[in-house]
Amino acid sequence: MQRHRQAEGRTTTTETPGILQRIFDYSARADPYPLYAELRETPVARQEDGSYVISTYREITDVLNDPHLSSDVRNLSHQIPPVEGEATSSFIHMDPPEHDRLRRMAMRHFGPPHAPGLVTGMESDLTAIVAGLIDDFAGKEQIDVVDDFAFLFPVTVTCRLLGVPREGEPNFHRWVSDLMNSVDYNPETDPKEKLDKGVQARKDLCQCLGELVEQSHVRPGDGLLSRLANDDGPDGRMADAEIVATARLLLIAGHETIVNLITNGMLTLLRHPQVLQRLRDEPDLVVPLVEELLRYEPPVHIIPWRVAYSEVTVADTVIPQGSQIMLMLASGSRDPKRFHDPDRFDPDRHDNQHLGFGSGIHLCFGGPLARRETQIALTELVRRLDRPRLVADPPPYRPSPVLRGPIHLDIEQGDGFIRQPRSVEWSRRGG
């Protein structure tokens, strides 16, 4: 994500003068979609620094599925400094065959076909965590969906998935919080302490994960860390450093995706009260509703770089080898050439092959779990909040145009707060 910020700061436009700068400007964060529409008028736009911006659905999917495109920054014609405190890259920054090997090894324990019941097996825990967080709203007339709910939920879930001891979860919450705060670090306005805390959190997180992996070799457990550490599958055993990188990916990238998806989802429902009421009456609606959210208000708006291995042609534009390519996912998911009435939120939309989780070999690794987390979270929030209403619209947004979502989402509710006994006891203060 720090590399993404470096990419943002370098890029300026030529063929589309001013549009990309206006998208990156904070004033556009609440509603960048009209600017995306302008950008789509030039599907592939060369930038002043030699990079290329792609903004239309067909061209984005072509690039995401093109084997001539790389996700490894080392293939860029200009070098990007490594992220401090990150010794080993995760497989989302690798290309085949190494990417395919590591992803196969991780997926043996994370989903079908070898672990088809992982997500469904976590449902009772997911529901209990959500219930515990919502129970803490009792007696409050105003809550912040980000601070009081969405920020806390995914870290706890991932810790349980990895097999982090309950007593260690508070440290993981603190490290992820410091890391996320440092992503939006602005040297012109923020104290350097903000960046330093993020760097230290990354080091502490990696050290702790490494220690847990070492312990798993001696005392195997049921968590994903232990299963990866002790699995001798067809591709051999994953190295400890690779396990740490995979776990870090789940914690950090997964956290930001789910926080934004839940928060954007709640904001969208509050802006569409008829859909909110319909979800309350028809809980099964949540499945297509979350798919529409991934299209309409996705958590990740931009993939800041892919790299051309060799010269490639996209929409009659020749892109030289080593060029940086920026993919505007959220623009593609609102492309009227692919989606009918794309600026309308429609949970009944058919053929909804959105770009919310990307496409191709780097399709979001944690997508199935992220979907289910969001489905449970939104269903329970809608069911249990009494007459929720926005305090401010638009809410304040995080600075990043890449990982776009409100930094706070304050909601007022009535005094008829719905509370029901929990079947599974849970507390984020004690586990």
Image (cartoon, rainbow, N blue to C red):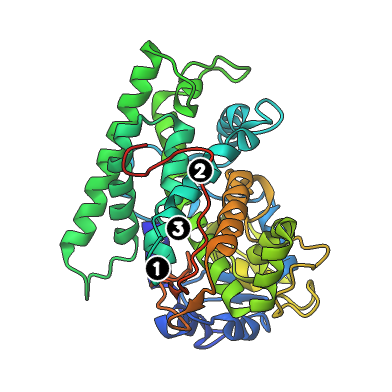
Name the residue rendered at 57%, 36% in the picture: 122
Write the residue at 75% across / 66% down: 58
Query: Residue 128 shows which numbered tag?
Result: 2
Please name the residue that numbered disc 3 is placed on: 150
Residue 60 visible here: no
SS at badge 1: strand
Instruction: For marks 3 and 1, give the one nearer the viewer.
Output: 1
Work out whether 260 lies above or below 359.
below
Q: Is residue 255 above or below residue 412?
A: above
In three-dimensional space, the C-alpha distance between marks 3 and 2, rounded to whole angstroms, equals 14 Å
Residue 260 position in % (x across, y down)? 50, 62
- Residue 86 sits in quarter: top left
Q: Quadrant of the N terminus?
A: bottom left
Residue 254 position, x and y percent, is: 49, 49
Q: Name the amino acid, label 1.
A: Ile
Number of marks in picture? 3
Crowding at mark 3 (Cα within 10 Å: few <14, some 14-19, many 20+): many
